[in-house]
Image (spheres, coloured by chain):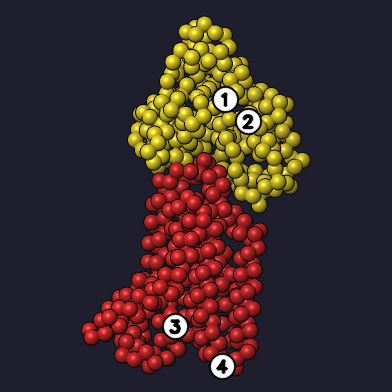
Chain colours: A yellow, B red
Amino acid sequence: MIIATNVTKKFGRLTVLNNVSVNCNKGECIALIGPNGSGKTTLVKSILGMVVPDSGFITFNGLNILHNWEYRRHIGYMPQIGRYPENMTIGHAFAMMKDIRKAEHHGPLDEELLHSFGLPTIMEKRMRTLSGGTTQRVSAALAFLFNPDVLILDEPTAGLDPIASEILKEKIVKEKERGKLIIITSHILSELDDLVTQVIYMQDGNLLFHKSLQNLQKDTGEAKLSRAIAFIMKSK
Amino acid sequence: MIKIIKHVIADILRNKIVIAYTIFLLAIGMSVFNLEDNTTKGLLSLLNIVLIVVPLVCIIFSTIYVYNSAEFVELLVSQPLQRKHIWLSLFSGIALALTLAFFIGIGIPVLLYSFTATGLILVGVGLLLTTIFVAIALLAAVHTRDKAKGIGIAVLLWLYFSLLFDGLILFILFQFSDYPLENLMLVLSALNPVDMGRILILLKMDVSALMGYTGAIFQNFFGTTTGIISTLLVMLLWIVLPMGFSLRKFKRKDL
């Protein structure tokens, strides 16, 4: 579904992505793992077209995403740090997004998260007054709102309280079972155990491996994802 | 695209600065005509507002606004929208809000008290300058990530157009005063939209006699329909070119 081929991106002298190639398919739930500054967010942003790679290309359903924008209607994106116009209320933000995507979104809206996060009661609050966790709830609810085929979640549970985080995880499992492609970047590996089917490990802008969870468990002899990754980091 | 423009304008209205700017212009516009019996004198006072204050407010407000909407733009870029449309909507939203403010603040008093060709040209030049300086502000803002630097560049650009450019022209005039420079002046004035606006208005006020031989050359050119149309075209270029450059930059910008 999403194929990245030899994507390279430099910020000044720093190479953030070095010849990265990935292949993501429908129904997979992919964990994008790596230390801080390994290029996870840049890879995600390249897929979204927010960062333009220096070389290499990315295709979505067989179409090159460069200068293309329509493909983004199939993607729900939850940024690492949701930043919204400060003067906007939560209600305004939802109304604006619905307004913008109304034209090409037909089917019903998925407002499950909106309700389970209790957002309808705080619709009047302005974005600048929200706590980090509440902003994350808004981002998550917006990402799932249009029932997209692909969900890209950048550190989804960072800043969420355990209850909200559990609600979000259940929602992710549910969407995975409906055959969607889900890409999650996270540091909290213990949370990913029951979610992911594939693991991509990145370091210093290089993609070190892309394996299914079973293969990773087999290769390392560890059942837990966190231990398997620790095993690999030590053996390097 | 219209939807985004709508949201930009709603956001601008919510922060009230443009409303304050409208009231400020309206207060000046009304008081100038009520203090003077001679409306031409009133227009002359407004000329300074149009040439100095309007570009300053437009360029500073737009630059800061673009930096402050970085989050908004980031949010939009991850949605199924063309970057071109996002940037043009941002431009149209700001330009519409500011031209509307100018039209209410200066346009209405001028139309009420001095409905003449000079008055109309003054309003037209003000509207064009507003849009031009919004376009220049967007160009300055898209090129620098650092907000303080971006605003600094905007202020410097305003200084250049309002003060430095005239100094440079005077310098050239004195250095090369032995040569016939009249036609060169014509070309040089096209490099500064503020100057073009000033010449256009002053000539309509029939004070070109004060400008000597150069004034006569200007009158010969700007006084004709061809002159006015080409001035208009050059001023439109001053909107299209900065917008084109900033759009090209924005399309490839990493957010």
As drawn, the residue found furthest toward the right would be A121
Q: Quadrant of the N terminus of chain A?
A: top left
Q: Which residue is mark 1?
A: A187
- What crowding class fits label 3: few (fewer than 14 Cα within 10 Å), some (14-19), or many (20 or more)? many
Callout 2: chain? A
Q: Determine if marks 2 and 4 fall on one subunit.
A: no
Marked residue nearer the N-terminal end (3 or 4): 4
Q: Is residue A61 visible?
A: no
Q: Which residue is mark 4?
A: B38
Q: CA distance from mark 3 to mark 1?
A: 64 Å
Q: Is residue A73 above or below residue A125?
A: above
- What crowding class fits label 1: few (fewer than 14 Cα within 10 Å), some (14-19), or many (20 or more)? some
Label annotation for residue A158: 2
Corner quadrant of residue A188: top right
Query: Which amino acid does the dot numbered 3 rest on?
Result: Ile
Marked residue nearer the N-terminal end (1 or 2): 2
- SS for tag 1? loop
Kindly report which numbered mark, 4 or 1, lies closer to the viewer in this rendering: 1
- What crowding class fits label 4: few (fewer than 14 Cα within 10 Å), some (14-19), or many (20 or more)? few
